[in-house]
Image: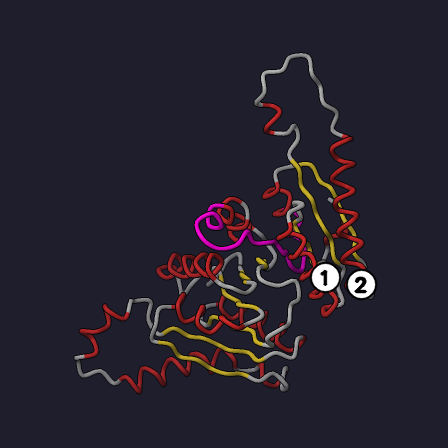
Amino acid sequence: MSESAHDAVVVGYDGSPTARQAAHWAAHEAATQHRRMLVVHAFRWPLTELTQMRVEAVVLPEEPFRQEYGKLVDTLVAECQALAPAISVSGEVITGEPVDVLERVSTNANLLVLGSAGHGTAHQVLLGSTSAELVRLAHAPIVVVRGTDNPATHRRVVVGVDGSETGAHAVDFAYDYAARHDAELVAVHAWSDLPLDALAPVREWDVDWPEISRAADLILAEALAGHTARHPDVQVRRVVAMSKPVQALLDEADHADLLVVGSHGRGAVRRMLLGSVSQAVLHYAKCPVAVIRVSNPA
């Protein structure tokens, strides 16, 4: 594996318009980070479709396919270099399953960027095949891009805060992004994973809801503590939501440039829940989504 992926912004490119859009987004983002950018096209060999054909005595050489894929990558590299002339942009064509190749590349990458297929059922199937696997496996933070090829239009970044170690890394990522893009940071903490209907009987009890709200706001304050000194110019808005985490995040991210979530939740019991949150926002958010993963969260 080439060392060009080390500390670089890496884009997985399959030749689709959405992958090209993601690469343009990544070029802008890499420029703000002053990092190299690497475009990676992974292709299966032998081609799955051809190996399923019962054709005897036919041996197809790999090199012509590699050359054609190389031309696609070179064209995109030139586009991204024009968008970000101050950084180095390179490309590689690597034989292997896309998920396996991009997982290996992400080991040394600063960021892994992928395109999104869109919304609805078809999008869910496509996301589940590659992006969802990489969200689970990739070593670097991963951004799934949709809706724009420019990282900063609305000047707003939304981050989900849950008090976990992974959530803390998500806050770090969101603050860094907001500072570089002169964006407002919206920190969201959803008090309960239960639907509001399930909370209705609870509301009839003698519950100190103002105190619960203050406690939730304290979680937000503690999660954001220390960042203000490092990023004094970042405007922060704290949101304590009574709605479910997915809905709270989607509501705030409706006009955002980026939504940042952790891939695990508050301890072992909650990890499946927040895992479902990260998957849900990947399916339904209108803006790019960053998923931050920690190998061994507390």
Question: Is 112 in the magenta?
Answer: yes
**Which sits in the foreground, 143 or 155?**
155
**Which sits in the foreground, 41 or 137?**
41
Kind of residue at disc 1: Ala
Is 96 on the left-hand or right-hand side of 249? Answer: right
Is 47 on the left-hand or right-hand side of 66? Answer: left
Name the mark on residue 87.
2
Kind of residue at disc 2: Ile
| Above or below, comparing residue 33 to residue 185 in the picture | above
Question: Is 114 in the magenta?
Answer: yes
Residue 268 picture location, percent across and down: 38, 59
Q: Secondary structure at mark 1?
A: helix
Pointer 1 local density, CA inside 10 Å: few below 14, some 14–19, many at least 20 = many
Q: Secondary structure at mark 2?
A: loop
Name the quadrant containing residue 63. top right
| Above or below, comparing residue 53 to residue 12 in the picture | above
Residue drawn at point x = 69 percent, y = 66 percent: 29
| Measured Cα–Cα span from mark 2 to mark 1 | 9 Å
Q: Which residue is mark 1?
A: 27
**The residue stretch that appears in magenta:** 104-125
Q: Nearer the viewer, mark 2 or mark 1?
A: 1
